[in-house]
Image (cartoon, grey):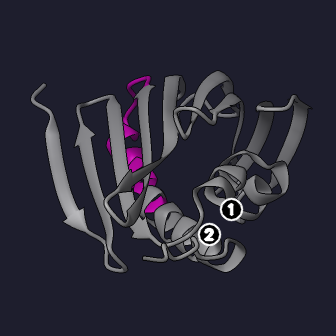
Amino acid sequence: MVPLTVFADGGNDIQYKFTQTDSTLSFYGSFKTIKRPDCLLEVFLNYNHIKALAPDAKEVQLIDQGINWNKIRYIYQKFIFFENISVWNRKLSMEKQRLDFILVSSLNNMVTIPKMISSSGFYQVKTQGEDIIVEYYQHCQLTKSLVTNLYLNIVKNEAIHFMERLLEYSNTICSDKPAINN
């Protein structure tokens, strides 16, 4: 299958790109901010922030954690009858200004819905000149089913809404980076 790639500007200075084949989806999103990088990284790792950024989840559970890592279980219920339980390992590298995540397990209550075979990605904070760039990337491989394309379209819309939520939330939680005095 030839991959389908879509580039877009989501407003609010959010840029995003989707690359899709018949059973994979990659999403890259970014936005500029003036917020402190250490605070942004805390938002990416801290369980309370993670939970706040997943308002559509039926449940978000902290399974285990350390100084720079955690294991999180998400339970999502869609269309009243579909439920997915996924577990993710997440690790922060302050040196790289990046939090990596990887899917540990995913369980659907219905076999007609595509199952995540694998998924991984990252959040990253980059300094470009005076700008702070927040990047989010995720690649997901799914099983094929009759509703895979519909499911991927839903996932695309949710990814865009997540970037909007992340921008708004981090702008609310984090303070601006200090100005450089000349």
Disc 2 secondary structure class: helix
Location of the C terminus (image quadrant): bottom left
Dot 1, crowdedness within 10 Å: few (<14), some or many (≥20)? some
Vertical side of 4 occupied by 163: above or below:
below
Residue lying farthest front?
182
Disc 1 secondary structure class: loop
Residue at left 43%, top 31%? 140
- The percent position of residue 137, horizontal first and vertical second, equals 42, 41
Residue at left 25%, top 38%? 20
| Residue 97 placement, left or right of 131 | right
Location of the N terminus (image quadrant): top left
| Residue 18 placement, left or right of 87 | left
Badge number at residue 170: 2
Asked if one can make out residue 4 in the rendered structure from this viewpoint, the answer is: yes
Asked if one can make out residue 79 in the rendered structure from this viewpoint, the answer is: no
| Residue 35 placement, left or right of 75 | left
Range of the magenta residues? 142-158
Tag 2: amino acid: Ser
Residue at left 30%, top 57%? 16
Q: Which is more foreground, mark 1 or mark 2? A: 2
Tag 1: amino acid: Leu
* Earlier-in-chain disc, 1 versus 2: 1
Measure the alpha-carbon separation of dots 1 and 2.
Answer: 10 Å
- The percent position of residue 85, horizontal first and vertical second, equals 73, 35
Determine the main secondary structure of the stretch shown in magenta.
helix
Q: Are marks 1 and 2 in contact (CB under 8 Å)?
A: no
* Closer to the camera in the image, 179 or 124: 179
> Which residue is the site of mark 1?
53
The quadrant in which residue 134 appears is bottom left
* Closer to the camera in the image, 103 or 66: 66
Badge number at residue 179: none
